[in-house]
């Protein structure tokens, strides 16, 4: 998504992804699995349309240009739909006979939900098997098919790339200016923020008015305390009132009073507010996911800083750091993620073979995935493909490349979902729980007890 479902999550914005209603309409009824092909359908020529909330238009054009070097006779027209408008636009389009040939879907119960639209998607298992072999799942990031396969076993879409949350991004220039070191523990975090405050500088900014990013913060705290409990609760195998989650919510609440999270956070959104403040050099730290890698590049950073309203934009070499150790137990720094989005082929497409060619090429071809990797927007869906650093212009390679490589390496091994295991209803209930605690309207135990009741219902 920006990575927003990408600051693009396209700020798929996480908050929007979790509050959008629409699953009540149920899965759309699809046509036969053979699609709506006609006698002129060809795997190597034709004109197809692609609708999605992400990638950005410029990135989409890069993908299509690379595709056309191999398949010059397939014309692909990409239409980016505003994140908040995607469901309202795609639902009637898929119900009609003139909808897009290719469309985005995503894991979980948010925008472009697989649950809502898998009925309009062809099963892509045959084409990916033909392309990569019967052991194709071993050749792609496991988190892709895990989130884009239906309960009946249909592969409804192919992932282009994945995004992961759980990392913290810092402005190293601000740390250097005040002689400070990025925090490794929760105690360090409090001390660092106190030091920044003594200089009148905002340390860590959180858009606590955005339920999705509150969930990311709480999820990270919980995983730092005891990995796996969050996912068990999401799957109904543990209670939201589990002691680990109560401790996590208590730590979450403490951050609003111990100087880590800025005052007035409950009235702030992660996008655009926090994003713009960080890019403008007004805060030293933010919690964003791997989609933020795109701002490590000179071009991406310059454009983003300019968009944040900074005159004569001068980018800074932002870097990621692991989430600080909350308890000192030494648990691995948490990361969790999903396929950023998957490309589905419309059952009513008049050119399903051409559409399948495009989707399969972008999701499984090494050259295509190299383009994806080099954009530093998504982490490649194809195993073994990483950015070709000689083709990537970073703001400061000496400080950024090693941290980016570390982040990508850690993320490529992650299978824990971010949103892919959450229904819309559960996501909404979690948003209410974190918001009530952040605002001081409920204690951690009260909020989690209410959440547990909602989960059972």
Image: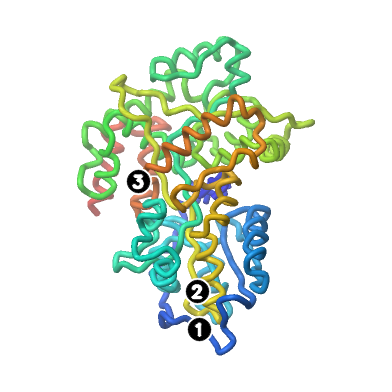
Disc 2: which residue: 346
Numbered mark located on residue 412 in the image: none
Which sits earlier in the primary sequence, circle 2 or circle 3? Answer: 2
Disc 3: which residue: 415
The residue lying at 38 percent from left, 42 percent from top is 413
The residue lying at 62 percent from left, 37 percent from top is 295
Task: Give the left or right position of residue 242, taking residue 356 as reference.
Answer: left
Task: Give the left or right position of residue 74, taking residue 39 as reference.
Answer: right
With respect to residue 61, does 408 lie above or below?
Answer: above
Which sits earlier in the primary sequence, circle 2 or circle 1? Answer: 1
Dot 1 surroundings within 10 Å: few (below 14), some, or many (20 or more)?
A: some
Disc 1: which residue: 36
Which sits earlier in the primary sequence, circle 3 or circle 1? Answer: 1
Q: Are marks 2 and 1 in contact (CB under 8 Å)?
A: yes
- Say which element carries label 3: loop
Which quadrant, please, contains the C terminus? bottom left
Where residue 268 appears, x then y in whole percent? 54, 35
Cα distance, mark 2 to mark 1?
9 Å
């Amino acid at each position: 998504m920006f990575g927003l479902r990408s600051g693009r999550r396209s700020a798929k914005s996480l908050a929007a992804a979790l509050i959008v209603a629409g699953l009540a309409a149920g899965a759309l009824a699809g046509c036969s699995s053979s699609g709506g092909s006609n006698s002129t359908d060809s795997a190597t020529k034709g004109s197809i349309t692609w609708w999605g909330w992400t990638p950005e238009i410029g990135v989409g054009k890069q993908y299509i240009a690379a595709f056309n070097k191999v398949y010059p006779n397939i014309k692909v027209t990409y239409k980016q739909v505003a994140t908040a408008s995607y469901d309202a636009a795609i639902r009637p389009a898929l119900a009609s006979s003139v909808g897009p040939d290719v469309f985005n879907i995503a894991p979980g119960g948010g925008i472009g939900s697989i649950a809502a639209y898998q009925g309009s998607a062809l099963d892509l298992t045959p084409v990916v098997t033909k392309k990569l072999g019967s052991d194709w799942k071993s050749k792609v990031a496991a988190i892709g098919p895990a989130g884009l396969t239906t309960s009946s076993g249909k592969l409804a879409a192919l992932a282009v790339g994945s995004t992961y949350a759980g990392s913290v991004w810092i402005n190293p220039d601000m740390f250097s200016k005040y002689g400070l070191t990025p925090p490794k523990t929760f105690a360090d975090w409090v001390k660092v923020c106190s030091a920044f405050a003594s200089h009148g500088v905002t340390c860590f900014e959180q858009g606590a008015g955005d339920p999705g990013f509150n969930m990311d913060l709480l999820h990270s705290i919980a995983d730092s305390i005891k990995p796996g409990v969050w996912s068990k609760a999401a799957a109904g195998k543990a209670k939201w009132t589990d002691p680990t989650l109560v401790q996590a919510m208590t730590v979450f609440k403490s951050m609003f009073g111990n100087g880590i999270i800025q005052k007035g956070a409950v009235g702030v959104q992660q996008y655009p507010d926090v994003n713009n403040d960080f890019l403008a050099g007004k805060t030293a730290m933010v919690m964003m996911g791997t989609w933020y890698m795109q701002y490590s590049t000179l071009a991406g950073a310059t454009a983003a800083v300019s968009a944040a309203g900074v005159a004569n934009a001068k980018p800074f070499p932002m870097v990621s750091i692991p989430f600080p150790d909350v308890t000192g137990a030494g648990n691995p720094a948490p990361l969790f993620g999903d396929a950023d989005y998957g490309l589905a082929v419309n059952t009513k497409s008049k050119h399903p073979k051409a559409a399948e060619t495009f989707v399969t090429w972008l999701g499984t071809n090494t050259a295509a995935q190299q383009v994806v990797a080099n954009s530093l927007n998504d982490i490649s869906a194809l195993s073994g493909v990483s950015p070709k650093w000689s083709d990537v212009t970073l703001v400061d390679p000496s400080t950024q490349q090693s941290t980016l490589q570390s982040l990508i390496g850690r993320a490529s091994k992650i299978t824990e979902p971010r949103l892919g295991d959450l229904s819309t209803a559960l996501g909404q209930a979690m948003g209410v729980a974190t918001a009530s605690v952040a605002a001081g309207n409920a204690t951690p135990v009260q909020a989690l007890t209410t959440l547990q009741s909602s989960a059972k219902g």
